[in-house]
Image: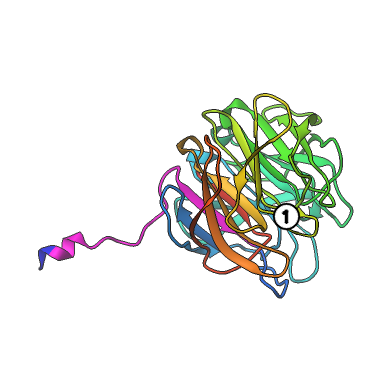
């Protein structure tokens, strides 16, 4: 056997703490998708197929328990024009189809979720039924079962984004509502209770993506619907304080989008989206602990929007 045979590498598999998975969404026909893609956040390049969701869904929520490698997708809107209550889970570092986890207490879509990483609590806020919701619920990610009431957001809204400072137990929810909402709320993830006002985004918008790091507790919100089109704005806050967001930079393409990150490794990614007329497959990346414009990373396996992202960081 040639010595070169030993040098051939197998296709890249998800790696610990550095894998992003984007699930669900829709294409131009407003047909819900069951597709999941994955890629390694610390590199660049196009995404690969991960597997399928049990139920195709537009605008689900997504979160994970970090290094324990369980990712969660739930809620959404399907091809039967119905809101969905079901929740599914995957093993982030092992490509394959999703399994049943449980349900939220309400069929809804356009909610958002965040988590405290290895403490295994995911918190889900807002949504639409079609009326807007202020409800917050939580799940224990490393088990299975239905969501439990946590408290309420400061106001009812949908199409919002969420992120957290990880094991430091603060989660924030930003934007949403009718596109003019700039409200940011915060909660303490390992307790229960109503959210508290944190401050305001630089621009009120919905359909935005959220991500964060843990080392300097920075939360970043990117893209969204602004004045009827896809915005390219990115802004940030310091999660362990309160106050208004500050300008970070711009996406490569203004669009509705979703985000996730590799946590302490300081890279955030925004995947997919639409400008309102053109559906995008683009993935951008930023360095979270700095500021500046996003850089092209690669492409999703297909152009789609109203997808959601998570990682095992």
In the picture, measured across the screen, residue 197 lies left or right of residue 236, that is right
Q: Is residue 307 visible?
A: yes
Give the structural element (helix, strand or loop) at label 1. loop
State the colouring used for the structure image. rainbow
Quickly name the residue at label 1: 75
For the point 42% across and 44% down, the residue is 16
Q: Position of residue 234 (x, y in %)?
A: 64, 45
In the picture, measured across the screen, residue 279 lies left or right of residue 266, that is right
Q: Is residue 115 visible?
A: no
For residue 175, what is the image quadrant?
top right
Q: Nearer the viewer, residue 6 or 118?
A: 6
For residue 98, what is the image quadrant?
bottom right
Q: From what the image shows, is residue 21 above or below residue 195?
A: below
Q: From what the image shows, is residue 281 above or below residue 19?
A: below
Q: Position of residue 14 (x, y in %)?
A: 42, 52
Residue furthest to the top: 241
Q: Nearer the viewer, residue 176 or 86?
A: 176
Magenta-colored span: 4-24
For the point 74% across and 66% down, the residue is 78
**Crowdedness near tag 1: few (<14), some (14–19) or many (≥20) residues, C-alpha within 10 Å:** many
């Amino acid at each position: 056997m040639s010595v070169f045979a030993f040098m051939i590498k197998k296709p890249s598999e998800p790696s610990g703490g550095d894998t992003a998975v984007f699930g669900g969404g829709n294409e131009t026909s407003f047909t819900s998708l069951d597709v999941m893609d994955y890629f390694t956040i610390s590199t660049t390049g196009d995404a690969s197929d991960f597997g399928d969701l049990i139920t195709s869904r537009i605008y689900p929520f997504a979160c994970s328990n970090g290094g324990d490698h369980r990712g969660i997708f739930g809620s959404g809107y399907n091809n039967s024009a119905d809101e969905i209550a079901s929740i599914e889970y995957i093993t982030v570092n092992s490509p394959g189809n999703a399994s049943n986890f449980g349900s939220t207490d309400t069929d809804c879509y356009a909610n958002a979720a965040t988590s405290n990483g290895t403490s295994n609590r995911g918190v889900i806020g807002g949504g639409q039924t079609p009326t807007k919701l202020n409800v917050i619920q939580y799940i224990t990610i490393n088990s299975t079962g239905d969501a439990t009431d946590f408290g309420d957001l400061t106001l009812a809204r949908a199409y919002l984004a969420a992120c957290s400072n990880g094991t430091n137990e603060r989660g924030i929810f930003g934007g949403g509502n009718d596109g003019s909402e700039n409200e940011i709320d915060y909660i303490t993830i390992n307790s229960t209770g109503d959210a508290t006002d944190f401050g305001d985004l630089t621009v009120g918008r919905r359909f935005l993506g959220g991500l964060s790091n843990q080392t300097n507790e920075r939360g970043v919100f990117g893209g969204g619907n602004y004045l009827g089109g896809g915005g390219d704005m990115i802004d940030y806050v310091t999660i362990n304080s309160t106050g208004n967001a500050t300008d970070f930079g711009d996406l490569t393409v203004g669009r509705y989008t979703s985000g996730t990150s590799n946590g302490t490794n300081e890279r955030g990614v925004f995947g997919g989206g639409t400008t309102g007329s053109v559906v995008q497959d683009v993935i951008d990346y930023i360095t979270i602990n700095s500021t500046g414009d996003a850089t092209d990373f690669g492409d999703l396996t297909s152009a789609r929007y109203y997808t959601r992202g998570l990682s095992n960081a």
